[in-house]
Amino acid sequence: MPVNYFTLKALSGELHSILQGAVIKEVFTQHRNELLITFDCSPNHSAKEQIKTLFTSVEPKFNYIFLRENVSRAKKNSVDLFTEILESTVQQISIHPVDRILFMDLQPTKRLLIQLYNTIESNIFLIDDKYSIIEAFKRNKALRGSVFQFRAGRISEIFFSDPDDFIKELKSKSALDIDLRLKQMLPALGSTYIHEILYRTQVSGTVQELSTEKLYTIWSELNKIFLELSNPEPMIVYAEGEEKILSLIRLDHLADKKGDNYSSVNESIRSFIAKSFHLKSFEMGKIELSKKLREDLEQSERTLIKMEEQRSKTDKDYEKWGRMILANLYIIRKGMNHIDLPDLIEGAKLVRIQLDPAITPMKNAEKYFEKAKKAKVADEELKDRFNRFQNKLTVLRKFLSELENCLTDDDLKTFITKNRERLKGMKLLKEKKEDVVPPFRIFNVVGSYEVWVGKSSKNNDLLTMKYSKPNDVWFHARGASGSHTVLKVKGGVKTIPKEAIRQTASIAAYYSKMRKASTVPVAYCERKYVRKTKGAPEGTVVLDREEVIFVTPSLP
């Protein structure tokens, strides 16, 4: 229930208290249908620990929103979005009075709408003061420029405030079961909370079967739960199997189930999503390994059938034909292509034996004996391979049986640990290769660009002459010794943000002898215009072209 209306309502209050006055520093996506917004929440925008990131998923049937600290942006496959709101200040975060839409009001007049319906309709919009869509996270081309339309409200406060109107509305469809009728009237409440109301009131049956007193009891308990939801005590309850329930209140109907309590709604959602991803990861890992095992099993079974077909008595046939030729040398002449001879075992049956007309009958007999010898060796090898495949089939079937019994992540880890070497040997398990970290100082600047900085004269040469590409941008403090600094540029990029150039120049100035100066001239150009002359000392290069920028030495 991470996007239950009342969960979002409580969360919006928490987010407002944390993010009001915060400045948006980055908006990007690095996973399908998930948007990340990074905020600087420190009063003077200098405390690194005050950087927080809002995660929002509009994946159909898997919506969520929560705040996290210490988030590292992926070096690859991330895309900047909603650039118009960068450096905007958050004024207010609130929720629509009757719908699962969060509003993030930004200075001066822009607004983010986060629509979380747990369906394909879920989306994030940037709108102006007239509700025109400036940018949409999903289907941007189709929606851009249109006016955002709110759907009709489905929550009626009158049901909570006036018992007579509430009961009258209930009875308007009296033939329905009470739980179904409550779901129709109060869809935002959700099945779990409706179940809790009926459990606490011990009410069941159709509306028409219930007395007015019972209906008043439902109204009274509904108001109590509504009050509890306004003062949340978030928890995650573990129901049957792997099912988890996120609740803002105690659930008496699940009192016998294990549960975890949380200090805030945000923390409960974070934990809920983490556990959901953990379960999803376990299921996908099990499915993937099971698929590989079944594919290998089917392939091995096909190979075994082919080997059984190949395992013939060819070696004995070759030897028999050689003996038949020796027994009939007196009637075989050189130059014959074949001869039909009585079978040694079944005399009445004639066997046609192919002959090489270029050699003598004796040589033909020797040739068949040699073939029999080779066929016998091949048959032994085939038998050995056949046995190995039979053993492999036994192991694969055993693995599949054990994998089926893995019901938790720990079970799967134990299975993989126990059989790791054998699974790797059968090429069913691949070890992840660790990324090789280049031997330089590495920073990130605006636009998700990486900056590499040399550590010594020798290291400078290594960076410039070996690790830099022609279209990378090379920096160095002008007129002072310092580190070679390279802004890494992906292929196809034509325009580099000016702020990225400025930040990289500030890094180059920082790692120079002029670090303590207030302003430092830094020369820069594309790496292809940097060359090293023969016999030049380590770290010394020549620039054929250069531009100069004046910056204050600093690190991002």
Image (cartoon, grey):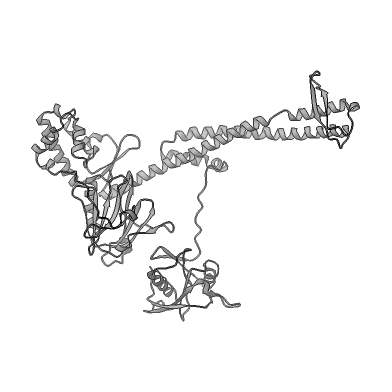
Query: Residue 235 location, x and y as percent?
Result: 26, 43
Q: Report the side of 88 relative to 380 (left or right).
A: left
**Nearest the eye: 192 or 237:** 192
Q: Position of residue 143 (x, y in %)?
A: 30, 54
Vertical relation: 298 (above or below) 117: above
Res. 233 in view: no
From the viewer's perspective, tell me whether residue 529 is left or right of residue 72. Answer: right
Image quarter of residue 372: top right
Q: Is residue 359 above or below residue 81?
A: above
Say whether residue 350 is visible: yes
Quarter of the figure that contains the N terminus: top left
> Horizontal placement of 251 versus 446: left or right?
left
Identity of the residue drawn at 32% across and 46% down: 120
Q: Residue at x 45, y 79 (%)?
A: 478
How many numbered badges does the structure rendering display? 0
Q: Residue furthest right?
A: 330
Between residues 337 and 161, which one lies in front from this camera angle? 337
Farthest residue toward the bottom? 479
Relative image position of residue 86 (x, y in whole percent): 31, 64
Residue at 39% from the left image edge and 43% from the top image edge: 280
333 vs 322, nearest the viewer: 333
Q: Position of residue 222 (x, y in %)?
A: 15, 39
Q: Is residue 357 above or below residue 502?
A: above
Residue at point 20% right, 37% down? 184
